[in-house]
Image (spheres, helix red, strand yellow):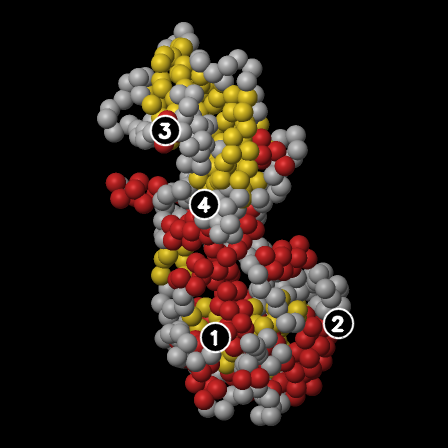
Amino acid sequence: MSTEEKSLNFLEQIIEEDMKNGLSKDKLRFRFPPEPNGYLHVGHASAICLNFGLGIDYQAPVNLRFDDTNPAKEEQEYVDAIKKDIEWLGYQWDTECYASDYFQQLYDWAVEFIKKGKAYVDSQSSEEMAKQKGTPTQAGTDSPYRNRSVEENLDLFERMKNGEFPNGTHILRAKIDMSHNNMLMRDPIMYRILHSHHHRTGNKWCIYPMYDWAHGESDYLEQISHSFCTLEFLPHRELYDWFLDQVYDSTKVRPKQREFARRNLSHTVVSKRKLLQLVEEKHVTGWDDPRMSTISGMRRRGYPPMAIRNFAKTIGIAKRTNLIDVSLLEFCVREELNKTTHRVMAVLNPVKLVITNYPEGQEEWLEAENNPEEAVMTYRKVPFSKELYIEREDFQEEANKKFFRLTLGTEVRLKNAYIIKGESVVKDAEGNITEIHCTYDTDSRSGSGTEASQRKVKGTIHWVSINHAIPAEVRIYDRLFSHESPDGNKEIDFKEFINPNSLEVITGYVEPSLQSAKNLDQFQFQRLGYFCVDKDSSSEKLVFNKTVGLRDTWAKVESKE
């Protein structure tokens, strides 16, 4: 890749500079290192697109490495979900790796640290350790166990590994500098005792490496050239490099950690801890609830993978954290679905329409185009009959001149069908309209080429034939949080901002071509929005999720507020 091809972000500039300084292109290797303690969210999607995108641009391999160093919170379910998400986004990793692959090597290195006087076993309580660590402006004090003999440290560390001590009794610390300006360098923890079953290694290990110790060394073992992470790891870079200094062989590639800013998304939370809270407290139906910011939730809602990739590309890579309006993601979704989805007819708030002069018992199958964006136009047949459903909002008994849909005495076109004229209404005892009666122009069928068919009317509305309509459960989703930054105020619980109207379940009617629709099939319900088939759907009961509207209605709401 060169600067002549495109404008480079600052991470790409780092890579280009390293290659100018002698790093061979065939030594480039990137990685995506998720922790398997939850489902991936939209923030992870940006990191996936970054690392795998670099792999594509530089034709370099990208490892998928699971940071599985905390068995108390990790499960195989999360590993499987993460792999599914990455593949769904359209990426393929070179090597599937696990930090647990390196447990023996990390342990062996830790033993060498002890032998060289660079690590020791500390037996203080966590409260005692916190006190002796000092503050950002005050140096820490040495642990009373800091100068244990090498022999004692080796003995204790091996017994820790063998499971002879309960959790919390001992830890292994690197011996660096208790007065260091960077508090992460004040004798950081390398290992803690954890009697917990590991999803890959079972009960083999009773001690587990800390992230700061395992991460850089895993990068080194895999010969990762560039380790890109978010800004909160900037203070960790010094420790990352110190650990590498102890094991680095100058004949090998030395990984380089560099940091980029998180891209937070408005009206969402992306903390796995908070997402887990939403699931466990049943504010949502699961990790893949279509209101969740998880990749699996976005997939179930009907977001196309290419829309998420385009979103990541649009927001780019930056050095400062900022809040991206979720409407930009929705724009990317809308733009992609407009190109790819078939247009179909569905009525979600039905009222009965009777064409009084249409022959009793007659039906026609009319031709309808599937997607005007297609290079080669395709068509389907939709049934038409005397009794139809139309949207209740598409009729007003009395309307002003700006209402271009159906009223008494005015004409509209039924999409793909005929021009009709409103004649009368039938009401129930409460005055609600139960039927609209109209007449149709028999010569006005769309596409027939007659003079009447080419007559211009001000409005076109959609419909479904009552005799052929298929009832469907339709789930209308709104934003899960009413506040643009629900976890932005530490004084207020983020759950206070949960939108009580984030889900509305209604029964609508769809045209019969949708009878065979399968899970995740996507459609544009004409004039209503984009919808996809939910996994709860069956041949006996169709279920659709609203993916996104045809227009950004929230922008209007927020501008009024």
Q: Secondary structure at mark 3?
A: loop
- Residue at x-position 53% and y-position 13%: 360
Element at label 1: helix
Name the residue located 45 percent from the left edge and 45 percent from the top edge: 372
The residue beneath circle 2 is 162
Q: Tell me the distance, in whole angstroms, between the alpha carbons under discs 3 and 2.
A: 91 Å
- Left of 494 or right of it: where is 560? left
Q: Residue at x 66, y 86 (%)?
A: 112
Q: Is residue 8 left or right of residue 153?
A: left
Tell which circle, 1 or 2, labels the residue nearer the N-terminal end: 2
385 lies above or below 381: above
| Numbered-mark total | 4
Farthest left residue?
401
Few, some or many residues within 10 Å of mark 4 (<14, 14–19, 20+): some
As drawn, the residue found furthest toward the front would be 450
Say whether disc 1 or disc 3 marks the residue closer to the N-terminus.
1
Q: Reading the chain from its start, which is encountered first: label 3 or label 2?
A: 2
Quick check: marks 4 and 1 in contact, CB under 8 Å? no
Residue 416: name its quadrant: top left
Dot label at residue 451: 3
Q: Is residue 277 visible?
A: no
Q: Amino acid at mark 3?
A: Glu
Residue carrying label 1: 236
Judge depth for marks 2 and 4 and give the one in front: 4
Q: Bin the neighbour count of mark 2 within 10 Å (Cα to Cα): few under 14, some 14-19, many 20 and up.
A: few
Query: In the rendered structure, which disc, 3 or 4, sits on the residue that comes first in sequence?
Result: 4
Q: Nearer the viewer, residue 176 or 328?
A: 328
